[in-house]
Amino acid sequence: MAALLEVENLRKVYRVPGAKGESADLVAVDQLSFELQPGGSVAIVGESGSGKTTTARLVAGLENPTSGVIRIAGEARNPLPWGRGERARNAGRVQMVYQDPFTSLDPSQTIESSLDEVLRLHLGRSKEARSARISELLSQCGLDDRHRNRRPRSLSGGERQRAAIARALAAAPQVLILDEAVSALDVSIQAQILNLLASLRAALGLTYLFISHDLGVVRQVSEACIVMHRGVAVESGATDDILSSPRADYTRELLEAIPRPGWAPRRRATADSTAAPAEPADGQLGVTNGSTVLPAI
Ligand SMILES: Nc1ncnc2c1ncn2[C@@H]1O[C@H](COP(=O)(O)OP(=O)(O)O)[C@@H](O)[C@H]1O
Ligand SMILES: [Mg+2]
C-alpha cells in the first residue's frame, strides 16, 4: 500500500542563546524517517526534550524543517509560508490534538461556534448543513447537542478533550497528530479517551501519529512505535516487539521506568511504608533518576 505520509531524513536545528552571548545550534530532530500507512497508527515515544513535539509541528506544517522531505499522498510538501489555498488543503489532511485543549479551544467561544468556525473555513456549507455536521461530530466524540452552548471551562477535562478532538475532526483530516493528548487526564478518563480514539480510527479510517512519553498508553493506540532520544530514533518497529524485547538500552530504561502496581519512589516508600503506591503526577514521565521523577514537558 502507498504511504499516506512519508517523512524522509527530517532535521530541525534551532538557534539558541549560547555561552558568552553567542548563539548555538540545537539539533532538535535529526535523521528521522518514517511512514504512516492509511488507517495506521504510529507512536513516537521518548522522554522530555527528545524531539517529539518538534516532529509533530513539522509534520503538521507549523514549521519548516531545516532539511528533509515530508510527502503527503506522494507529493512533497511546499515550504512555508503558504497561501490560503495551501493552508486549507493541508488542514484537510493533517490536524493536531494537543495536551492542553485550550490550545485549540478559545475559552470565550461556545463549543458550537468553535466547531462552526472550522466548518465555515473548510466546508463553507449552508448553516443547516453545518449544524447537522456539528451534531454528528459531537456524537462521534461522545458529546451531544447539550454541549453546543457550553464554554470549554464549564466542561470536565475529558469532555474538553473530546471537544478538542471534535474540532480537529471538523476539518475532515486524514491524519490526526495527537501530541500528549491523554497525558494530562486522570487514568480513568485517559482510558475513555483512548477508547474513543480507537473507535474513531476504526469508524472513520483515520491515520494517527500518536505522541507520548508513556509507553504504557502507546500499546493501546499504536501498532508501530518509534523511540526517540535526543532528536534521533533509537529504535522502531512493531509496538508489541519493542515492548516485549527492546533492543536499545534507552528503550529498556524507559520500559523499566513504567510504574507498575506497587511502584513507589524510594524516598516515599521508606518514609511511610504503609502509604499507597505513589503515582507519578499528570504529565510526568515515570522515569526515576535516583529519587526524582523527570517532568515530561
Ligand atoms: N522553538 C524552539 N526554539 C528553540 N529550541 C526549541 C524550540 N522548540 C523545541 N526546542 C528544543 O528542542 C528540543 C526538543 O524539544 P521538543 O520537540 O519540545 O521535545 P519533546 O516534545 O520530546 O519534549 C528541546 O531541547 C527543546 O528545548
Ligand atoms: Mg512535547
Image (cartoon, rainbow, N blue to C red):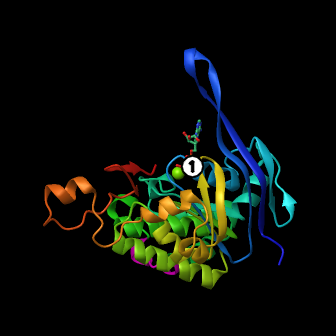
Identify which residue, 202 or 209, lies in the foreground.
209
Q: Which segment did they paint magenta? A: 139-147
User: Is 172 rendered above or below residue 26?
Assistant: below
Name the outermost residue toward the top.
Answer: 20
Q: Is residue 141 magenta?
A: yes
Q: Residue at x 56, y 14 (%)?
A: 20
Assign a secondary structure to mark 1: loop
Quadrant containing the N terminus in the rendered view:
bottom right
Left or right of 200? Residue 107 is: left
User: Is 250 rendered above or below residue 21?
Assistant: below
User: Is 58 rendered above or below residue 193?
Assistant: above
Image position, residue 65 (x, y; %): 74, 44
Left or right of 174? Residue 259 is: left
The yes-or-no answer for disc 1 within 8 Å of ligand 1 is yes
- Amino acid carrying label 1: it is Ser
Image position, residue 200 (x, y; %): 57, 79
- Decide: few, some or many residues near mark 1? Use Cα within 10 Å; few <14, some 14-19, many ≥20: many
Q: Quadrant of residue 149?
A: bottom left
Image position, residue 174 (x, y; %): 70, 70
Left or right of 74? Residue 96 is: left
Q: How many marks?
A: 1
Q: What residue is disc 1 on?
A: 50
Q: Quadrant of residue 147?
A: bottom left
The answer to whether residue 182 of the structure is visible from this angle is no
Q: Residue at x 41, y 71 (%)?
A: 190
Name the outermost residue toward the right.
Answer: 75
Image position, residue 172 (x, y; %): 66, 70
